[in-house]
Amino acid sequence: MSEKKKFYQTDEFRMFMGKYGIGVILIFMIFVIAVMKPRFIYPSNILNVLTQISVNCLIAYGMCLAITTGGIDLSVGPQLALVSVLLGQFIVVRNMNIGLSIILALAATTLFGFINGVLIAKFNMAAFVVTLATQLVIRSIAQIISDGKGMSMASQAFKDIYSGTLIGVPLPIIYMVVISVIMYIVMHWTKFGRYVFAVGGNVNAAIASGVDVFWTKALCYTISGLLAGIAGVIFTSKTGSAQSNIGVAYETDAVAACVLGGTSFAGGISTAPGVLLGAVIIGCIYNGMNFLNIGSYYQYMTKGIIIIFAVLLDMVINKKNR
Amino acid sequence: MSNSEYILNCDGISKAFGGTQALKDVQLHVKPGEVHALLGENGAGKSTLMKCVIGLIKQDSGTMEFEGKPYQVNGPIDALNSGISMIHQELNPEPYLTVAESIFLKRENTRGILLDKKAQNKRCQEVLDKFDVSYNATTKMKELTLAQVQMVEIIKAVSCDSRLIIMDEPTSSLDSTETEQLFEVIRDLKSKGVAIIYISHRMEEIFEICDRVSVFRNGTYVDTKSMEGVTRDELISMMVGRDVKSVFPKVDCKIGETVFKVENLCGDAFHDISFEVHAGEILGIAGLVGSGRSETMRAIFGLDPITSGKMYLEGKEITNKNPRSAIKKGICMVNEDRKNYGLCLLRSIRENISLPNLPARQKGLILNQKREKQECQEAAEKLTVKAASIEHNGFSLSGGNQQKVVLAKWILANPKVLILDEPTRGVDVGAKSDIHTLMCEFAAKGMAIIMISSELPEVMGMSDRILVYHEGRISGTIQRKEILDNHITQKDILAMEFAQHNKD
Amino acid sequence: MKKKVVAALLASVMVMSLTACGSSGSSGGAASAPASEAPASEAPAQSEAAPASEAAAEGEAAADTAASGGDLNGDGKIIVGYISKNTTDVFHATLNGAAEERLDSLVADGTIDEWTGILDGNTDAAKQCDLAQDCINYPCDYVIILPAESTASDPAVTSMADAGIGVIVVNSATDSTDSAAMAFAGSDDVYAGELMGNYVMEHVEGGGTFVHCQGIIGNSAQIQRGEGIANTIEKDSGWTKAADVPCDWDASKAVNTVDDYLAQYGDDLKAVICDNDDMSSAAQAECNAKGREDIVCIGVDGNQGPLQMVKEGTLGATVLQDGAGQVNAGIDAIVASIKGETVEKKIIVPFVLVTPDNVDEYLK
C-alpha cells in the first residue's frame, strides 16, 4: 500500500488522472456490465461497440475543437445528410467513380465548415447561433438535392467502406484509429493545436502573443466539417442509402462524448484521447444498457445520470489536483 | 491566547494545497484602529491567510478569534456580516450595475420579493455623501475609473459597518494623487477605530501609512514589528531571507544606434507622439494613469489602431496591423493587464512561454517539443519562476511568478524592442529586483527597452531617459544624468505629469 | 522522443489491443463480419459446440424448416430480440406495448427463455444497424424489427440474417426483406393511401381542392401512402391537389397547414388527406373550430384519439392500421418456427376503414 501511495502522490500521476480520470470510470463501467453479462466483453462485442462508435467519435473530434475555442458546432448532423445525398447523386445518378465522389462530397462539407468558421471568427458571431442557422441551411440543401427521397446505394464496393475488414478488424475501427492518431498530433503536437487551446483559454492573451485568432477558429470549424463529412461517408455506407433525413440530434452524442472526455465548455481545455474515451463510454452505455435489458424508456435517464455523474466525478478529481 | 487588546487573533494556521504547504503554523494579531501591514514576497502566504480570514478557503488547522470571540466563517458574505471585509487586488466590477447596486449587492433593500431601488439609492446616496466623491448612487460602474471603483469597495466595506478591512495591493492601479486620496480615507477610518490589514509591495507606502508590520516568508510567519524604529533594509532582509542588492541595479551600458522611432503618432488617446529609442537604452515613461502612455504602446504593438503618424524599425518604415506582425518584426510587449493580455492561466507554464515562439520551433508541421521543453525550462529557470514543474498551469502561480512567465515568453522571442508596461506591478521585492537585473542584461545585449511605470522611483532608478506624458502628449524629457546630478527630483517629474494643468 | 511517441499512441494502442485480442479470440479471424460463419465463430467460445454449429451452419434454411426447435445459435437458450422503430409516437407505443405483453407471456409459459426488451431504434436506420449488431452479440435466435427506413435499415436485416438469426420484419418491409427475412408481417401502405383517396372521393360530391399533409419525407410509409393517393384522387379530374406539405407526422404542423390553405383557398378547400391520423384528427378539429365541418379530413393509423372522435362524430373516418395485429402475426411466426411448423413468408394484415358503424370494435 505504501509504495502505491508514493506513486499516487507524484505530480505526473495527478496530472494524468486530471486528464484521463474518466478512463477509470470507463473501466469500472465495463467491469460492472461484464460481471452481469459476460458476453459484453466477448471480442466480437468489443469490436461491435468500437465499430458503432466510429461515426460519433469522428464527429466528436470536430465538436471538441469547436468547444475548445469556446464555441460549438451544431451543424454536424445535417453535414452527414449533405454528404449522404451528394454521394447518392454522384455515385448512383451520375455514375461517378467512388473515390472522386467521396472527395467532392467531403469538399462540400469542408466548405460549409469553413463558412461556419468565417461567420464565427470574422464577424464575431456566437457559434451557437451561427451553426444553429447553418444547420437549417445545410439540411435544406440536402433535401433540395435529394428531393426528399431516399436512394439505395447498392454498390458492394461502396458498402465495403463500412463492412469491410482489415486483418479481421472492421474498417470503421481502422478509420477511427487513424483519425485518432492524426487528431492527437494536430491537437497536441502542432502550432495550430496550441493556438486552439490559447484562443479558447484567453483570447486576448492569444492575440497579444501573436496568435491569428481568425484562422485558428476558422480552421477548427473547417476540420469539424471535414470530420463530419467522413462520418457521413461511413454512415451512408453503413445504411447503404443516401438520405436527407439522417443525423438528427447527432450533435448531442458528440457533445456528450466531448464533455465526458474532459472538454471544458468554458474553452481552453480538452484532450484527443479524452474525446476517444468519451465516445467509447457513450458506446458502452448504449450497448451495455441493451445487454442489461434496461427498458428503452429508462435508457435516456440512465444516460443522462451517467453523464452528470461522470462529469461530477471528473470535477472532483480535478479539483483535488488544483 | 485570547487577548482583548486585539481585534483579530489568528494562531497556528496551516493550509496545504495538494502537495504544497501554503501556510505553516502562522499567526497574526491585529489591534483595533491600527493599520497593520502584511509583508512578504509573492507566494509567502499573505493572500492565502487573508482568504482564510474571509472564508474563501478553510484552513487545515489553527484557530481564529474576532473581537474576542471564536470566529468561524463560511464565505465572504458571512465574513461581511461578522464585520470583516476585503478589497481585492484585482477588482471585478459588474459593468452594468449602478454604484448603489454594487454597494448593496447580496443585501439588497427589498419590499417583499421585489427590489426597492428607490430606497436603496437613497440609502446609498447618504453613505456616498459622507465621502467626497464625484459620482452618485445611480452612476454605472463602467463609467468609473479603477480608483473610483476601489473607493466604491471601501465605501461598501464602511457601509457594512466593517471593523476590519483587508486591502490587498490597493494602490497597484492608482496614480500618485489617487494614492494620496486613499491614504486620507485610511487615516479617517483609523481614527474611527477601524482596523486595516494593508498588503503592499511598496515600501514607501508602508512606511507612510502603517503602524505595525507582520512579515511572512515561504508560508511561515517571521516576525511582527512596530514601524517606528524598523528600517527598510531590515524589512527586506526579513522578507527575502537574504540581502538584496541596491534597490535599482541599473548598470550603464553602451547606447548604440537608433533601433525604433515614431513620428507624430496619433491615436484615440494620444496625439503627436514622437520619440526614438536606441540599442542598449532603457526608455522610461512616466505619467498618470490614463495619460495615454499605455495606449501609445498598445497601438505600437498593434493592439489598438493608429490614426496617423509613422513608425520606423532600424530605419525602415513599418506598420503593425496586429500583434502578430509586431512580434514577427521583433517588437514585443508585456501588457499591464496581466490577467487579460498576459497569460492563459488554464494552460501550462510551458505552453504559455512557447506560445508566441511556436512558428520558429516547428519541424515541418510538427512542433519540436524537445527543444520547446528545454528552452521553456531554461527561460523559467533564468527568471526563477517558482513552480513545481513547467507543466503546471498558470493558476498555481502567484502574481509575481505569473509576471515572470510573461517575461519568459518574450525573452525566448529575443525581440529588438521590448515594451514593458508596469513590469513590476504586484511583484514582490525579490522578483522585482530580478526583473530589473534582467532588464539591464537585455539592454547590455543591445535590446531597446521601453518601460512604463507608475512608480516614480522605479522609472528614475532604471531609465536612461524618461519621457513624461500628460493628457496624451509628451510634456517633457529627462536624461539620466539630470537625475544622478539631482537636477531633477521626483517632485519635478510629478509637476511635469500635471504640467498642463498648472498652465490652464 | 520515443517515449513521447509511445504516450501519444496511448489511445490507438488501447483500441488496437482490444481489436488484437478480438481477432485472436475468434478462431476464424472475421470476428464481427457479417459473413455466415459468424455464429460458428461464436461457437468455440461456448462449451457445447458440437450440435449447435450443425444447426447454425444451415443458416436460413434452418429457419424455414425450424428443425433446431428454435435454438438457432445453439447456446441452449431461445432468445428473442425486438428492435422498435421508436418508442415515442403513439402508433408505435401501442405496437411496442402489444409486443411486450405477448413476449412476456411467452417467457412466462416457457416457449422462449428470454427477450431483449424493447430496443429503441430512435427512427434512425444507423441506430437500428447498431442494435442489429447488439442482437447478434446478445446472442438472439429470433429478432423482430420494425424498420425505420426501407433502404437504410436493410443492412440491419441482412446482417442479422447472415448471422443465422431468424428475422421477422414487421410493419414495413426493407429492400431485401423478401430474400433475407424469415417472415414479413405488415400492411400495404399503398392500399392505405388508396383507401383514403377513395373515401374522400365518395364523401365529397363534385370534387374540389385538397391538401396533403406528409409524414417525414423519405419514410417508406410516407412514400407509399403518397403513392396510393396518387393512384386514386390525384387521377380524378374533379380534384386538384393544392400541395404536398411536409408535416413530419406532427399534428401541430398539420394544423398550421390547414390554417394556411384555408386562408388561401377558402371554400374551395374540401378535403385534407394526412399520412397519419394524429395529423388528420387535429386538422379536422381545426376545421370544425373554424366552422368548416364540411371539410373531410382523413389519415392512417387508428390511434385512440382519432377513434374517439369518430365515435363522437366529430371525425368522419380514419384508416386503422392494425399494429397490434401485425406484431402478433410476427410473433406467431416465431412460435410456429419454434414448434417446427411451416412459417408463412408474407403475412398481410389488412387496413380497415373505421367509420361510426364499426368504431366500437376498435375503441378500447
Image: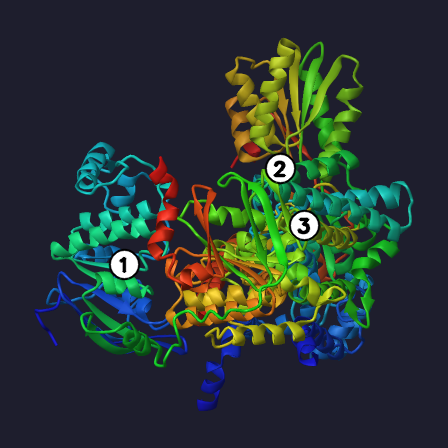
| Mark 3 to mark 1 CA distance (whole Å) | 43 Å
Hey, what amino acid is under mark 1? Met
- The amino acid pointed to by label 2 is Ala
Q: Quadrant of the N terminus of chain C?
A: bottom right
Marks 2 & 3, CB-CB < 8 Å contact? no
* Residue B30 position (above or below residue C173): below
Mark 1 and mark 3 in contact (Cβ < 8 Å)? no
Front-most of residues B16 and A245 = B16
Residue A169's label in the rendered image is none
Q: Position of residue B80 (x, y in %)?
A: 21, 55
Q: Nearer the viewer, residue B261 or C41?
A: B261
Q: Which residue is mark 1?
A: B167
Label 2, label 3: how far apart the Cα atoms are? 21 Å
Chain letter for mark 1, please. B
**Label 2 to label 1: alpha-carbon separation:** 49 Å
Q: What residue sits right under mark 3 in the picture?
A: A215
Earlier residue among tags 2 and 3: 2
Dot 3: chain letter: A
Q: Nearer the viewer, mark 3 or mark 1?
A: 1
The residue under the point 73% across, 56% down is C167
Residue at disc 2, secondary structure: helix
Is residue B251 rendered to the left or right of residue A183?
A: left
Residue lying furthest left in this view? B4
Helix, strand or loop at label 1? It is strand
Asked if marks 2 and 1 touch (Cβ < 8 Å), the reply is no
x and y, in percent, of residue C117 in the image: 58, 58
On residue A133, which mark appears?
A: 2
Residue C21 appears in view: yes
Q: Nearer the viewer, residue C346 or A44?
A: A44
Q: Nearer the viewer, mark 2 or mark 1?
A: 1
Mark 3, secondary structure of its residue: helix
Q: In the figure, is residue B311 to the left or right of B273?
A: right
